[in-house]
């Protein structure tokens, strides 16, 4: 390419694609907006929201004696990898942020709104913006380590190992926050029955034991030694009444707000927090809403898809042997969780963590769904509610067998599409993390809990400040 040609260029920076063209202008043009390359003036054509960033890149790039498109691309690449320039461009790129709901450009397929939101929030340009805002007056001191991962990846075991290495750290989490809210809701709606249950069972002060007594009727409760037969009858009546009538009235946003309050309180007291979530964008949104700034370390917990079903069976066997039904994971929800975090490769430079075969997904999904149906049938009340919901969705004139078959097909098609199998012709998909910015990617099928905890206990060179 010579200076007499037009330039058409695209480059990626901080997980975002920038596209632009440089169109040759007349030599006597005196526009202050012109880009000069080897004495020739060019007009920059690009998205107005990207103009400031692209101009800063070109300004910092040596543009003399360009010979080809590759030459320009290579020089831009050198510019973008300069540490000094990275700090500078982050300041400029603040003005170029798109609305959060707008899909990122340069993708073969637009990202869904939630993924686009997460990727945008995690960009360093927005992090710099957070640091510049004077309105963010609530500051955390100690770091918060976030384990982002799907069910059965090994998050809980990792957290226990981490707490042994970091005894001053505090564990929080969505599950813990949910249990606390469940218990509070039961106490609010059924104060009399709440008191009966607390007075009857061993470990009633523990949220898990309390909730198991109500929502896991297949498990025999552990009564206190002082409990007599009449008390047991009252206990059974109380749990039945709560199970049939309780209404949980809180949203994901409320749970995330509660969790953030705990993390911030720990941080301001100098206690680092470790917690696990399926999606981190809810916590980040609460940071924005509450004007909070915290140092986060983000770790993706990963277990290959083909190993999930095996882990699920082992986990459930242990839960049954140890009489801990809250640890049972039945059905296909964990496969959907996996697909929420890991999706088809979209860009040439995306990290490929796994190659997935369509037949494996179909086989694994059908097996998991069959196990879910069998488990539901052990709890007639739950099974009846499920069938009723299927009739509302697919039609009341269908038999139970047909309803279940339709639900299985629906769940399977949803999962296949999430994972990138958008047509029957696609037999293999390369998976990559949907989250573009993180400190650690931990394959917990390879790393032992101690090994993963050792990695987490080492401080990274930087934090995501939110």
Image (cartoon, helix red, strand yellow):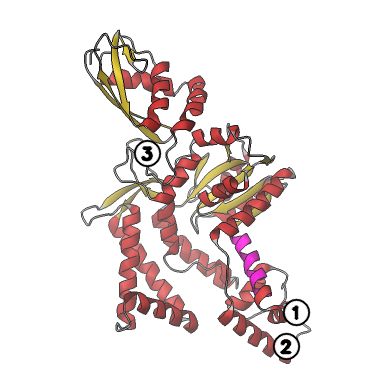
Give percent across and percent down for residue 358.
Answer: 29, 56
Residue 183's tag is: none
Percent coordinates x, y for residue 357 in the rendering? 30, 54
Asked if labels 2 and 3 touch by Cβ distance under 8 angstroms, the answer is: no
Q: Is the C terminus in the top left, top right, bottom left or bottom right quadrant?
A: top right
Q: Is residue 45 above or below residue 324?
A: above
Q: Which of marks 3 and 2 is nearer the N terminus?
A: 2
Q: Which secondary structure dominates the residues rendered in magenta?
A: helix
Q: Does the magenta stretch include residue 189?
A: no
Which residue: 68% across, 53% down? 262
Q: Is residue 449 above or below residue 87?
A: below
Is 182 magenta? The answer is yes
Sort mark 2 into few (<14), some (14-19) or many (20+) by Cα contacts within 10 Å: some
Query: Mark 2 = which residue?
Result: 231
Question: In front here: 401 or 125?
Answer: 125
Gap in Å between the C-alphas at discs 2 and 1?
A: 9 Å
Of the numbered discs 2 and 1, the one sitting upstream in the chain is 1
Residue 192 percent location from the top left of the image:
71, 81
10 Å crowding of disc 3: few (<14), some (14-19), many (20+): some
> What residue did someone put label 3 on?
350
User: Circles 2 and 1: CB distance less than 8 Å?
Assistant: yes
The vertical placement of 242 against 171, above or below, is below
Quadrant occupied by the N terminus:
top left
Residue that mark 1 sits on: 199
The magenta segment is 174-187
Q: What element carries label 1?
A: helix
């Amino acid at each position: 390419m010579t200076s007499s040609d037009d330039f058409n260029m695209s480059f990626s920076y901080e997980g975002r694609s920038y596209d632009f063209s440089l169109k040759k202008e007349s030599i006597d043009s005196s526009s202050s907006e012109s880009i000069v390359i080897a004495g020739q003036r060019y007009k920059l054509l690009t998205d107005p929201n990207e103009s400031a960033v692209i101009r800063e890149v070109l300004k910092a790039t040596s543009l003399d004696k360009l010979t080809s498109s590759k030459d320009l691309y290579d020089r831009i690449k050198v510019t973008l990898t300069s540490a000094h320039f990275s700090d500078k461009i982050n300041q400029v790129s603040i003005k170029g942020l798109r609305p959060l709901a707008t899909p990122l450009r340069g993708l073969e397929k637009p990202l869904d709104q939630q993924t686009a939101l997460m990727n945008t929030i995690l960009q360093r340009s927005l992090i710099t913006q957070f640091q510049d805002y004077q309105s963010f007056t609530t500051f955390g001191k100690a770091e918060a380590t976030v384990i982002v991962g799907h069910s059965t990846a090994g998050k809980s075991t990792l957290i226990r190992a981490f707490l042994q290495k970091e005894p001053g750290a505090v564990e929080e989490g969505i599950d813990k926050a949910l249990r606390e809210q469940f218990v509070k809701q039961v106490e609010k709606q059924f104060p009399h029955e709440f008191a009966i249950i607390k007075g009857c069972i061993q470990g009633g002060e523990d949220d898990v034991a309390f909730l198991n007594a109500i929502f896991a009727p297949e498990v025999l409760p552990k009564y206190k030694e002082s409990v007599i037969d009449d008390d047991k009858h009252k206990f059974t009546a109380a749990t039945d009444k709560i199970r049939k009538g309780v209404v949980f009235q809180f949203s994901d946003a409320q749970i995330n707000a509660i969790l953030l309050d705990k993390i911030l309180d720990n941080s301001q007291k100098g206690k680092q927090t470790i917690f696990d979530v399926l999606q981190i964008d809810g916590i980040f949104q609460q940071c924005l809403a509450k004007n909070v700034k915290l140092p986060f370390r983000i770790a993706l917990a990963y277990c290959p898809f083909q190993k999930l079903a095996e882990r699920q069976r082992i986990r459930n066997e242990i839960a049954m042997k140890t009489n801990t039904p809250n640890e049972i994971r039945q059905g296909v929800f964990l496969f959907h969780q996996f697909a929420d975090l890991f999706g088809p490769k979209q860009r040439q430079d995306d990290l490929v963590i796994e190659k997935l075969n369509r037949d494996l997904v179909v086989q694994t999904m059908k097996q998991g769904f069959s196990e879910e149906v069998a488990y539901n049938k052990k709890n007639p009340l739950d099974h009846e509610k499920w069938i009723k919901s299927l009739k509302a969705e697919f039609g009341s004139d269908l038999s139970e067998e047909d309803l279940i078959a339709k639900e299985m097909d629906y769940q399977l098609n949803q999962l296949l599409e999430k994972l990138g199998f958008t047509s029957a012709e696609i037999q293999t998909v390369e998976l990559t993390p949907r989250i573009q910015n993180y400190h650690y990617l931990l394959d917990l099928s390879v790393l032992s809990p101690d090994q993963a905890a050792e990695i987490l206990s080492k401080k990274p060179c930087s934090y995501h400040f939110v």
